[in-house]
Structure formats: structure tokens, C-alpha cells
Image (cartoon, helix red, strand yellow):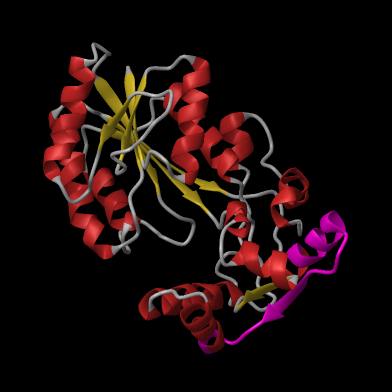
Amino acid sequence: MTILVLGGRGKTASRLSLLLHNAGVPFLVGSSSTSYVGPYKMTHFDWLNEDTWTNVFLRASLDGIDPISAVYLVGGHAPELVDPGIRFINVARAQGVNRFVLLSASNIAKGTHSMGILHAHLDSLEDVQYVVLRPTWFMENLLEDPHVSWIKKEDKIYSATGDGKIPFISADDIARVAFSVLTEWKSQRAQEYFVLGPELLSYDQVADILTTVLGRKITHVSLAEADLARLLRDDVGLPPDFAAMLASMETDVKHGTEVRNSHDVKKVTGSLPCSFLDFAEQEKARWMRH
């Protein structure tokens, strides 16, 4: 069995690739990058270029590895990627793939939009087995701009979440769940896992943890949705529509949409997910002032 890992250099796919490599599991990385340099077998994959889809399976054949029988399916949440996602699933089925692991999100139910539509499509196919992973917000988001710059330069976290809480999850734990599912496949027809962290935290609580870890006061600045959208647009430079979408998602959190509990990480992997405190201790150098 060879596993195709899409989203090659993304947060979860890169970590999954390392786990598969270390375990000696045959896999092939599909990446939109044409300049990939690394220890893994890689092939170019572009959601908007169907020629690259069939080339993935040709590459596996030319490399003399076992045929691809499972796919870690990572796409964007943009509406324009839904139809290509459905078509790729059908192409993969025609090539003999009968197992899919779809990375979706905690707030995207089956059949609603983006990855939820792919979820529904997989569910409609009686000849495939699939697992859908529904993680919540990544801890690693705080290691990227604009958050990392706000924390390092201003000692602040800006959000429109108010006192809404999120069960933040590490990308390492998402990758561990994906690895376990792909390498220890149970004979289920369909399965859905909520991949959540061990605790519900508001950004006030996140700021308190960072204060303790970093040894300087970090403050959460609570903004109205419109003000956050303006900040993301004017100061950070995000496109207006994208800034508005992110601000709207944070307002949803304010209203409790991410207040969830799940033991699925422990159920699948046998160990608890990382706490935000442990994550912050591991990554504190990223927020330190130099």
C-alpha cells in the first residue's frame, strides 16, 4: 500500500510525511511547489490542473512503488476548489484508490460548504472507505503573522472572539491522528473524528499562559468584528473579503461555536493531545524579543 499525501508542505501534511518516513511506510507527496527539495518522493500536484492528477499515479508506477491505495486529502476551503476536489476523488477511484482521509474542520458539517461538500461526496460512494478529520483552530496559528508579530512587537493578541473559548489543537496531534488512521485502518465504511485539544481556552487565558511562559505581560485586546476586519485589511494587508471572513469566524467563536469536547485524539492514537501550556513552552523562543 502506498499513501498519497496531498498538501505537501502544509502544517499537517509535512508532519504526517515525517511520521510515515520514520515508520518506513511507503508514501508519495503531492505538492503545488515545483521546487521541493527534501528526503521524500514528491510529485507536482495542482488542484486546478487535472494533468497533474493522473501524473501522480504515473509517478508511483515509474518509481516502482506499490500502487496508491489511500489518499490524505487536503484542499483549500475556497469554493472554487470544491468541484476539482470531487473530480479528483473520482479520478483516484478509477485508479484503484478506495480509502480517503479528508482534512476538514470542526465547524464544517457534512454537506454544508467547502470540505463539507467533499465529505458528503465521499459518503455517497458505496465502494470507498473514508475518515473525516475535523480539527479546531491550530495552536500553530500563533506562530505565524499577524499573531507572532503582535505578540513579539506589541505584547498583544487582537481578536473578535470576546470571551469565547476554543479547544486549540496542535498540528502535531492532527498528524498523529492521520497517521494512526492511515496505517491502522479499521474496516469501517465511514468515520468522523473531532480532533480537539484537551482544554477550552479563551484568548484571555491564552494571553495569561503566554505571560507565564514568556515572563512578560501579554494582553488580549478584544475588538468588534468590523474593527478586526479593518485591522487585518489596513494594517496587516489582507484582501478585504478575506479579512472580513476571518473576523466573522472570530465572531462565531464569540457566540460559542467552538465550545466542544472530544476524546477522539486519545481514542485513535492512545495518547492525550498536547496542552497549550506545553506547546507554549516548546515554542517560546518564537515569541521572544531579540
Quarter of the image for residue 82 reads bottom left
Horizontal and vertical percent for residue 221? 70, 79
**Which residue is at a point 12% across and 31% down the rendered structure image?**
94
Left of 143 or right of it: where is 15? left
Would residue 202 be seen by someone viewing this image from the given angle?
A: no
Left of 69 or right of it: where is 243? right
Q: Is residue 16 above or below residue 151?
A: above
Horizontal and vertical percent for residue 98? 25, 29
Horizontal and vertical percent for residue 11? 49, 45
**Which residue is at a point 42% across and 28% down the rendered structure image?**
38
Q: Magenta segment, which residues? A: 206-226
Q: Is residue 86 above or below residue 179?
A: below
**Which residue is at a point 75% across and 50% down the rendered structure image?**
284
Could you say which is closer to the camera, residue 170 or residue 42? 42
Quarter of the image for residue 157 reads bottom right
Quarter of the image for residue 126 reads top left
**Can residue 158 be found in the magenta stretch?**
no
Horizontal and vertical percent for residue 169? 61, 50
Q: Is residue 238 above or below residue 230?
A: above
Q: Quadrant of the N terminus?
A: top left
Left of 59 or right of it: where is 154? right
Could you say which is closer to the camera, residue 74 or residue 262? 74
Q: Quadrant of the C terminus?
A: bottom right
Residue found at the far top of this picture: 64
Would residue 115 be seen by someone viewing this image from the given angle?
A: yes
**Can residue 212 be found in the magenta stretch?**
yes
Q: Is residue 100 above or below residue 194?
A: above
Could you say which is closer to the camera, residue 290 or residue 64? 290
**Which residue is at a point 28% across and 45% down the rendered structure image?**
123
